[in-house]
Every structure is written in C-alpha cells, then in structure tokens.
Image: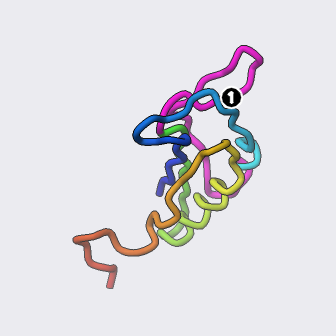
C-alpha cells in the first residue's frame, strides 16, 4: 500500500523548495521503501519538494495491516515543512468492496 506525502498547499498551490529530510531513516523501516515523485536537488545538494505529490511511501507485507504499518512507520520518519499525508489509507475496506471472509 502507498501513502502519498504532499507539499504544503497541495492540491491548489503546492509550495516548492522545502527541504526533505529523513529519507535514510524511512528507508531503514523493514517492509517499506520511498519513491520520489515531485522532488528536485537544490544548488546546495539538498533534496527538496518540487511538486504537489512529493513522495510515495510504499509498505508491503503478508497482509494489508502489515503493509499499512510499515508504510506509516516510514512516513512518520520523513520531515518536510508543511508536508502532509492522509492518516486513513487502508484503515478499512475501500468503498464498494466487501471485507475478506
């Protein structure tokens, strides 16, 4: 499962240029990895936000609960001023689906 970390102001007016920190910490979470989407490298070599949907934090595991836990543990380690993400991803069955029997 994937948690998207968005820039401040997303979706209307995403703010760019803010430094992203904690990627190494996030990559150390078992069962998780981070994909960059709206990122850039500043002239000083810092990873920064450059779009609305900045990062995708992916969690995997033997079931949805394990994948969710891994993704959120990793997302919690990333710092982006004004960045935000939804806390309810995979919290329950998707609308229009039936829970597993």
Tell me residue 68's x, y (percent).
Answer: 54, 65
> Could you classify mark 1 by the number of other residues whose Cα lies within 10 Å: few (under 14), some (14-19), or many (20 or more)?
some
- Nearer to the camera, 91 or 79: 79
Q: Can you tell which quarter of the image residue 12 is in?
A: top left
Q: Is residue 94 magenta?
A: no
Q: Is residue 6 above or below residue 70?
A: above
- In this picture, is 44 found above or below 18? above
- Under circle 1, the secondary element is strand
User: Viewed as shown, does residue 29 lie left or right of 93?
Assistant: right
Looking at the picture, the colour scheme in use is rainbow
Q: Where is residue 66 in the image (x, y as percent from the top left)?
A: 56, 69
Identified at 66% across, 32% down, the residue is 18
Q: Is residue 34 magenta?
A: yes
Give coordinates of residue 13: x percent, y percent: 45, 35
Q: How many labels does the image show?
A: 1
Is residue 5 rendered to the left or right of residue 80? left
Instruction: Write down the quadrant of residue 99 in the picture.
Output: bottom left
- Residue pushed farthest left? 96
Residue, x 51% and y 53% (percent of image)? 3
Q: Residue placed at 54% from the left, 63% from the top?
A: 67
Reply above or below: 79 against 99: above
Residue 44: where, in percent of width, then height?
Answer: 77, 17
Q: Which of 24 and 6 is in front in this view?
A: 6
Q: Residue at point 61% right, 47% down? A: 33
The magenta stretch spans which residues?
27-52
Quarter of the image with the C terminus is bottom left
Q: In this figure, which residue is indicated by the disc labeled 1?
A: 47
């Amino acid at each position: 499962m994937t948690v998207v970390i968005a820039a401040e102001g997303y979706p209307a007016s995403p703010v760019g240029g803010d430094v992203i920190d904690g990627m190494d910490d996030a990559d150390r979470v078992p069962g998780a990895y981070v994909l960059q989407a709206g990122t850039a490298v500043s002239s000083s070599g810092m990873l920064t936000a450059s779009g609305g949907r900045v990062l995708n934090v992916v969690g995997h595991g033997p079931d949805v609960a394990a994948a969710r836990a891994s993704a959120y543990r990793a997302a919690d380690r990333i710092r982006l001023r004004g960045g935000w993400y939804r806390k309810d991803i995979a919290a329950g069955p998707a609308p229009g689906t039936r829970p597993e029997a």
